Image: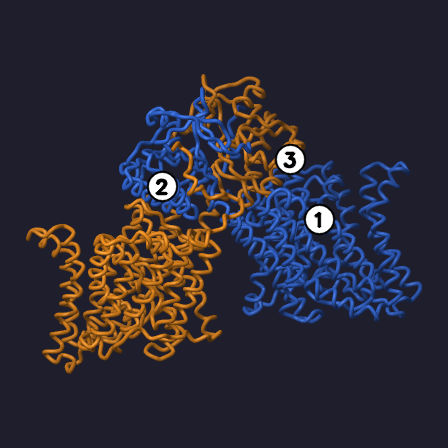
Chain colours: A blue, B orange
Amino acid sequence: MNGWPNPTTPPPPKNGPLPVKPFRAYFPILSWARSYDRRTLSDDLLAAVIVTIMLIPQSLAYALLAGLPPEAGLYASIAPIILYAVFGTSRALAVGPVAVVSLMTAAAIGTVAEQGSMGYAAAALTLAGLSGAILVVMGVLKLGFLANFLSHPVIAGFITASGILIATSQLGHVLGIGAGGHTLPQMIASLVRGLPQVNPVTACIGVAATAFLFWVRRGLRPLLRRMGLGARAADIATKAGPVLAVVVSTLAVRWLGLDQMGVRIVGTVPQGLPPLTLPPPSADLIGMLLVPAVLISVIGFVESVSVAQTLAAKRRQRIDPDQELIGLGAANLGAAFTGGMPVTGGFARSVVNFDAGAATAAAGAFTAVGLAVAAVALTPLIYHLPIATLAATIIVAVLSLVDLAILRRAWAYSRADFIAVAATIVVTLGVGVEAGVSAGVILSIVLHLYKSSRPHVAEVGLVPGTQHFRNILRHDVLTDPALVTLRIDESLYFANARFLEDYVADRVTPDCEVKHVVLMCSAISDIDLSALESLEAIAHRLATMGVTLHLSEVKGPVMDRLKTCDFLQQLTGRVFLSQYDAWTALHTGAEPARRVIRTG
Amino acid sequence: MNGWPNPTTPPPPKNGPLPVKPFRAYFPILSWARSYDRRTLSDDLLAAVIVTIMLIPQSLAYALLAGLPPEAGLYASIAPIILYAVFGTSRALAVGPVAVVSLMTAAAIGTVAEQGSMGYAAAALTLAGLSGAILVVMGVLKLGFLANFLSHPVIAGFITASGILIATSQLGHVLGIGAGGHTLPQMIASLVRGLPQVNPVTACIGVAATAFLFWVRRGLRPLLRRMGLGARAADIATKAGPVLAVVVSTLAVRWLGLDQMGVRIVGTVPQGLPPLTLPPPSADLIGMLLVPAVLISVIGFVESVSVAQTLAAKRRQRIDPDQELIGLGAANLGAAFTGGMPVTGGFARSVVNFDAGAATAAAGAFTAVGLAVAAVALTPLIYHLPIATLAATIIVAVLSLVDLAILRRAWAYSRADFIAVAATIVVTLGVGVEAGVSAGVILSIVLHLYKSSRPHVAEVGLVPGTQHFRNILRHDVLTDPALVTLRIDESLYFANARFLEDYVADRVTPDCEVKHVVLMCSAISDIDLSALESLEAIAHRLATMGVTLHLSEVKGPVMDRLKTCDFLQQLTGRVFLSQYDAWTALHTGAEPARRVIRTG
């Protein structure tokens, strides 16, 4: 094989028609199911057992976070996992309820129904169904690129702010007080108002569970390693910490009768397989949940794909982002029809699944079986599970999402990125999750457009003894009073076309010695119709001043496009292949440029 | 003077603080008023006489188009012109009511008040005041660049569609039937319904005036030239055509008593100087008119600045776009307080003013005096002026704005531009002017972002015998199976960062021979934080496959920024000054690339 792209992986075409996707590609399961053998089976089974143990408390906790009954979390981890195994392209991704999506679910449904009501759970189904439909449509229409408009700083800021909101929202459960609110100020006010009603027993359980889980995260792994456990086994044991907290606190409540002392418990959870449910087909509800569903879909997709890509690269496997949309969409549709809630690929569980040796998506299917068994057999055992323990599980899990250092990193790297991340965090905390994401996306697009509307333009001169041209502000170069060469470091399009007109006018109008202007186009990859008309205007205005306009180093595709119109015929000057050709043809007497600043 | 920018016109700084504007620069009048002499005075006076004659019928007609009483058009041509002369930077621009802005005014006010009511005229004042305030604020805050987001195709499409709407809206007046509607389908339906009520006398006047004015445009100039008139005199005489139509049709109505036969006439126009008016300070009204006012301001500014720049270049004068905002803002505030309507710099009248020899903005002030005299002395004479003649004036003036060829030009040049222009035309005609502009702006931004989110990436190889690297798909080049070099033809930012991740993964994952990936950065002018994190992810994923990532030809400013973070320390490979250095250091055995397509 030479340096040529593998025929099975052509580079994406830029403007041509999209290739038709073969039917088979919609069912990634077909690519591994045939070669499935006993060794793969045992790998997958082991991974499934470990992930199942981890997922039971997590599923209950995220249902709590979304304001739903605990079984919704379990149900959302059964059918969705199986559907993802059929349609998804990642072999290690574990799909189910995750923290940020559960928070967004609570925020979205909280506006349309009362928590705990029938309408609330029904709205969760509608939200999952809508989200699934949106993901599938995006996948079929190959709209996965839309997710790219969520910039990394916006995602980082959003997840950090969500982590803070989630942790704060669970503090009430940990202390045994009812607290509400969807923004940080509301939540804090509600907590402060509730402080006199703290339930001491609940607070003991909650604080102890939180402290224990923090210690498990920080201290247990080193301890187990010192006790001679292998690195992988120590990792996995650490992930089982929440199960231990659940078991101990449940037994404590049951034996000491703490629920009689005001400790809120999970209570009766229906025993059985996930029910078949139909999301209510209400047009009003769909209208109200559409925007939240789009945001949940895109946020969930972005999180999931980035985990999937990272894990796939470790085994030289590939992810097809458009097929991922279909896989996640199928999972959400599955959740909608089996009493669940919106789901996506989770980071922690996927890493555990991968580390535990999951070789194919069948591991996910076995996990689903494990959770189904739990739903049928284990639900009576969690009757006495205190809510405070679940809240502690959530707090410890989400605080690892909080990364305020992103603010410092963004500030150091670029002001535009800092503004985007800071605005996302402030708006998410102060107004809400949907406003936060929207503000971040819109602001980063606006800042990008602003930057590209004021491109870097360098007046260049000849580096003596070479054929190179460099910025006269940074280098000792030769210039010619009659010849101005401007290098524009950006593609020309409507937002910067008039900037270039102004720039050329400002440079040339007061300087009567100028006879030739050369635009050096080495960094111009595209010229749109606005920019073409600006170039025509520049050429025309320069002509009225007796100045000729030339171009140099025009790229092939740009030249192809310019040839489709009469700009080149009307150009007063010439198009030079290289800037040195332009200099040779046009310069009369060169003199060294006055150099003022040297920053490079 | 050498090739150095003139100290009085520094190139705009890219990211640095904006220079503080000296107080004097807010009053461009100071730059020419002191050197004003008798020669300049006579030039300006002559131009003023010619423009005044042209403006009288035009001002009446555009007031009619906006649904306002005729005097509003006259008033809007007096104070605004004087204020622009003080604050504006163009010496030839003639400010007053123009067709497109009058149409937008009618559309905006039509939604908040009944045409002909007191509230309607008051709303026009509020709209002008709002528009003036917005322009001044934009000028002081130097937000003129916002206008750049109106791409040329969107403006061209919008003006074409507006011309069609305006001409159609006046057909009812020409035929003597009452017709209404704000969209093309509504207008046509209304015309068809009104056809049985056509007033034959009005239709005769209207059709005759229209035919005459068309002939003046097409046939009069050549005729006058053949009769021996100079080119400039013939041009100016042609512009006086509408005055002749006004005089003849007014006399016809008066002498034949046609107004008794159902011909609608202008009627009583108040005699006197513009009144002092106060736009009603109603918060409700301001809220409803804010968005239309923004659109009117931006559209008016864009039209006006492009005329001003073209005329200024002819005399090597300069326009300061931010000061233009202040000049136009002052003009609109003037209109608001003197019984006028929204105004901007008009194309036709400015060209006439320029051609007639206007040397300074004083010509505009003399025009204002001429129109004030008309308002005081001539208004009784236009009592019998038929509305049909004014409608004919408008139709003939605006049909020159209609340029459907823009569709063909855009189609030939680029599909994205075609989509933007077609959408603007269709939405403007079918939904309305505000929706049309908004759709065009949003669509062109979306298309631009889409294009830049899928940048052109070329895999390059060495052109034998040179140090140049070119696209392996276009050229016979040498490649190395272990070394993949990708040249990305776009700055890296959030929208294309993940595209690059996918591209590199698709290229490298299935090809186990690859040991080194070089990203050639010659066309990359910026790397934002998202792209930086994508580069880190790419480096990390390549490292897990045993592949090293290198960079080459990184630009100075980009390198400066990368040095502020630890990416370069963590980079598994090296940063090469030139791509040839990278090749020399990394290649092992080169073989000719398999070449498939040759398009360049």
Helix, strand or loop under label 1: loop
Residue sitting at the far left? B227
The residue depicted at 49 percent of the width and 43 percent of the height is: B13
> Could you tell me how far apart the alpha carbons at marks 3 and 2 are, in whole angstroms?
44 Å
Helix, strand or loop under label 3: helix
- Which image quarter holds the C terminus of chain B? top left
Indicate the position of residue A447 as horizontal and vertical percent values.
53, 50
Q: Nearer the viewer, residue B216 or B470?
A: B216
**How many marks are shown on the rendered structure?**
3
Question: Which chain's residue wears label 3?
Answer: B
In the drawing, does residue A132 fall left or right of residue B14? Answer: right
Indicate the position of residue A528 as horizontal and vertical percent values.
39, 44
Vertical side of A392 occupied by B448: above or below: above
The residue to which callout 2 is attached is A510
In the drawing, does residue B284 fall left or right of residue A352? Answer: left
Q: Quadrant of residue A224?
A: top right
The residue to which callout 1 is attached is A403
Do marks 2 and 1 share a chain?
yes
> In terms of sequence position, does the residue under pointer 2 or pointer 1 come before the other?
1
Indicate the position of residue A467 as horizontal and vertical percent values.
43, 23
- Looking at the rendered structure, which numbered label has been put on residue B567? 3
